[in-house]
Image (cartoon, rainbow, N blue to C red):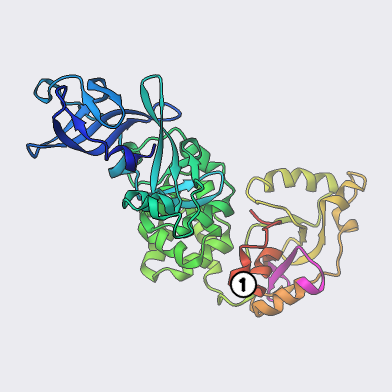
């Protein structure tokens, strides 16, 4: 049976007189499949009351009360109980297994040991027809009668106030989704539901998700959330991605968030924002591995252990002079193949492919493609190392927007 059918069953007194119409169904979410705890009823004398399941007899073509309505103590709905029509029907849910946003058109219920359990969410067109009382016309119209159900345990309801809707599948399962899957879901949702998802995540997970969200949605989300929380998420984002979204925000809002961020991250972003967004400086990141040319291979490896705490991925290792000039580049593989006491200056490659901070972004992307690079160093005043442009940023420049989501970020977050 479906909830849409269940609520149409007449509610009668012990002597068979109709006493009211079912308006809603109240369930407890404590079980894997919630149990119906009470019915919300519009009585024939135009009152609304909640009747506990313990006062109800067997469900058949009618539901018979065990006692007269006047002798029934009204059920008090607890904070964690759910009214299905008010809280679930027509609401958007995240299909965890399908990684999509769905709409609840109906709910399937099943009797077990004298109770009725909610066992599935109907996301199909048949659910709408059933609620309109048009279920019988589906077949003549050529609409398949096949059920389109998601098990209750595989959904997580989206509601601005999670405290009023606690389902078995918690926010913990949403957190296990890949950031790209999460971003795809967020892009499908309204602002309030999107903020609910982001606010359920820790700062790092929220940052990873926000990096994958469309630019327009990034702006609305940061403007919609509490400023301190927005600043904390920006702190965790890659500098180039954070700079991009800050550049799209109104100047006053961007300045407010920069002031709330950690000073080191804020200073890096202010420097990035000085460069035009279509230049190498505008798309580069300041997270990269940089070591002094006077170190040995072993000392470089020791330094990398500290550098790795602040750098998401180490593509290449850039070697600089005392004055900050880029003098060479090497890799972890190169370092592992030599004696630990070998000076890094002896194994670094000095024929460096690099670009100026003001180089056009399309030329930067062509350089990365031409030389088959994972990252390209960006310099100012010929040799001062300022950042790197990674291959995933080059892909974002070259590919049309519709294709960006189809390309895995193999080298990024």
Classify residue 61 by image quadrant: top left
- Residue 264 visible somewhere in the drawing: no
| Residues in magenta, as a range | 369-385
Q: Quadrant of the N terminus?
A: top left
Residue ID at (16%, 35%) = 20
How crowded pointer 1 is (Cα within 10 Å; few <14, some 14-19, many 20+) is rated as: many
Between 163 and 288, the one lying in front of the other is: 163
| Label 1 residue SS | helix
| The furthest residue to the left | 45
Q: Is residue 166 left or right of residue 294?
A: left
Classify residue 200 by image quadrant: top left
Q: Magenta includes 28? A: no
Percent of width and height locating residue 81: 30, 32
Between 65 and 268, the one lying in front of the other is: 65
Between 250 and 46, the one lying in front of the other is: 46
- Residue 309 visible somewhere in the drawing: yes
Between 238 and 110, the one lying in front of the other is: 110
Residue ID at (82%, 71%) = 371
Classify residue 230 by image quadrant: bottom left
Which residue does the numbered mark 1 point to in the structure image? 281
Q: Magenta includes 375? A: yes
Q: Is residue 124 left or right of residue 241?
A: left
Residue ID at (42%, 68%) = 249
Percent of width and height locating residue 45: 7, 37
- The image shows residue 71, relative to residue 378, as above or below, that is above
Percent of width and height locating residue 273: 52, 70
Percent of width and height locating residue 323: 71, 64
- The image shows residue 203, relative to residue 396, as above or below, that is above
């Amino acid at each position: 049976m479906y909830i849409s059918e269940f609520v149409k069953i007449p509610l009668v007194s012990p002597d068979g007189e109709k006493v009211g119409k079912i308006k809603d169904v109240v369930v407890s979410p404590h079980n894997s499949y919630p149990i119906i705890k009470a019915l919300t009823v519009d009585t024939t004398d135009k009152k609304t009351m909640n009747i506990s399941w313990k006062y109800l007899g067997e469900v058949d073509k009618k539901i018979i009360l065990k006692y007269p309505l006047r002798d029934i103590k009204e059920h008090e709905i607890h904070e964690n109980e759910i009214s299905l029509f008010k809280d679930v029907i027509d609401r958007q849910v995240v299909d965890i297994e399908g990684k999509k946003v769905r709409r609840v058109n109906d709910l399937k219920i099943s009797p077990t040991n004298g109770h009725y359990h909610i066992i599935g969410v109907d996301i199909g067109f048949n659910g709408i027809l059933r609620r309109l009382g048009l279920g019988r016309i589906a077949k003549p119209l050529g609409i398949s009668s096949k059920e389109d159900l998601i098990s209750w345990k595989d959904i997580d309801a989206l509601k601005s106030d999670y405290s009023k809707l606690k389902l078995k599948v918690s926010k913990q399962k949403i957190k296990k989704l890949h950031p790209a899957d999460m971003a795809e879901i967020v892009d499908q949702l309204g602002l309030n539901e999107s903020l609910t998802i982001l606010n359920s995540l820790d700062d790092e997970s929220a940052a990873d998700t926000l990096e994958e969200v469309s630019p327009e949605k990034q702006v609305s989300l940061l403007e919609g959330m509490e400023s301190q929380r927005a600043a904390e998420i920006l702190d965790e984002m890659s500098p180039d991605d954070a700079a991009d979204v800050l550049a799209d925000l109104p100047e006053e809002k961007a300045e407010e968030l920069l002031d709330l961020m950690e000073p080191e991250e804020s200073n890096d972003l202010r420097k990035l924002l000085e460069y035009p967004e279509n230049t190498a400086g505008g798309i580069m990141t300041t997270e990269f591995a940089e070591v002094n040319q006077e170190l040995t291979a072993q000392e470089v490896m020791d330094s990398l252990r500290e550098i790795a705490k602040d750098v998401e991925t180490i593509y290449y290792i850039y070697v600089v002079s005392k004055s900050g000039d880029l003098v060479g580049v090497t890799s972890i593989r190169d370092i592992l193949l030599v004696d630990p006491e070998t000076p890094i200056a002896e194994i670094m490659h000095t024929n460096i492919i690099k670009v100026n901070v003001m180089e056009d972004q399309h030329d930067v992307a062509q350089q990365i493609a031409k030389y088959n690079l994972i990252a390209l160093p960006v310099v100012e005043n010929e040799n001062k190392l300022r950042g790197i442009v990674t291959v995933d940023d080059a892909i974002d420049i070259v590919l049309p927007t519709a294709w960006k989501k189809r390309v895995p970020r193999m080298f990024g977050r």
